[in-house]
Image: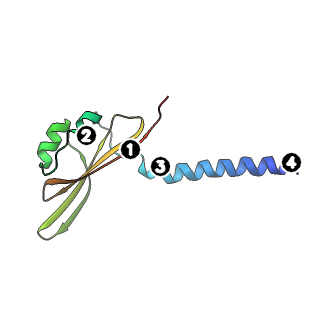
Amino acid sequence: MRLFAKFAGAFLAAFGLTLAITVMAPASPYYLPRTHCRVTDAGFDALEMKKSYADIAKQLGCNGILLNTEDYGRLQIKTYAWRGHRWPYDVIKLGFYNDTLQKTERRIYALNW
C-alpha cells in the first residue's frame, strides 16, 4: 500500500507540474519575437497616458510587438507588448486608443534569490 501511495503521489506531482507548464507556456515572453529591447522599471514608471505610440516607442527605446488590432469605426484599439527586464517573466502590454496610450498592464513573475 505504501508503494502505491508513493507512486500515486509522484504521478500526481508530475501531472500537476506538467499541467502548470502547459497552462503558463502560452503566456510566456518567449512567444514574443526575439528582441534586444528590455523595458526597465524606470521606463515603465515614466509612461504618461495620452501620449502617441511613436512617443512611447521612442521613450522605451524600441518598437513594441503588435498583438491585436480592433476597429470599431471611429475607434481603433491597438495592443502592443514589450519585454521587461526581470527574469523569468516580465511582459508589458500597452493599449492605444486612436493612437493615444489609454491602458497599461504589466505581468511579472520574478525569482528573487
Rendered position, 35 above or below 22: above
Query: In the picture provided, is 80 more to the left or to the right than 14?
Result: left
- Give the class, few, some or many, for how many residues have Cα within 10 Å of label 2's Cα (few <14, many ≥20): some
Label 4: state its secondary structure: helix
**Residue named by callout 2:** 44
Residue 94 in view in this figure? yes
**Residue named by callout 3:** 25
Q: Amino acid at mark 3?
A: Ala
How far is disc 3 from disc 4 in space, using C-alphas?
Answer: 34 Å
- Give the class, few, some or many, for how many residues have Cα within 10 Å of label 4's Cα (few <14, many ≥20): few
The quarter holding residue 61 reads top left
* Residue 21 on image: x %, y %: 53, 48
**Residue named by callout 1:** 29
Residue found at the far top of this picture: 113
Q: Amino acid at mark 2?
A: Phe
**Residue named by callout 4:** 2
Q: Amino acid at mark 1?
A: Pro
Tell me which residue sits at (23%, 45%) in the image. 64
Query: Closer to the camera: disc 2 or disc 4?
Result: 2
Return the residue nearer the eye: 106 or 99: 106
Query: Closer to the camera: disc 3 or disc 4?
Result: 4
The quarter holding residue 76 reads bottom left
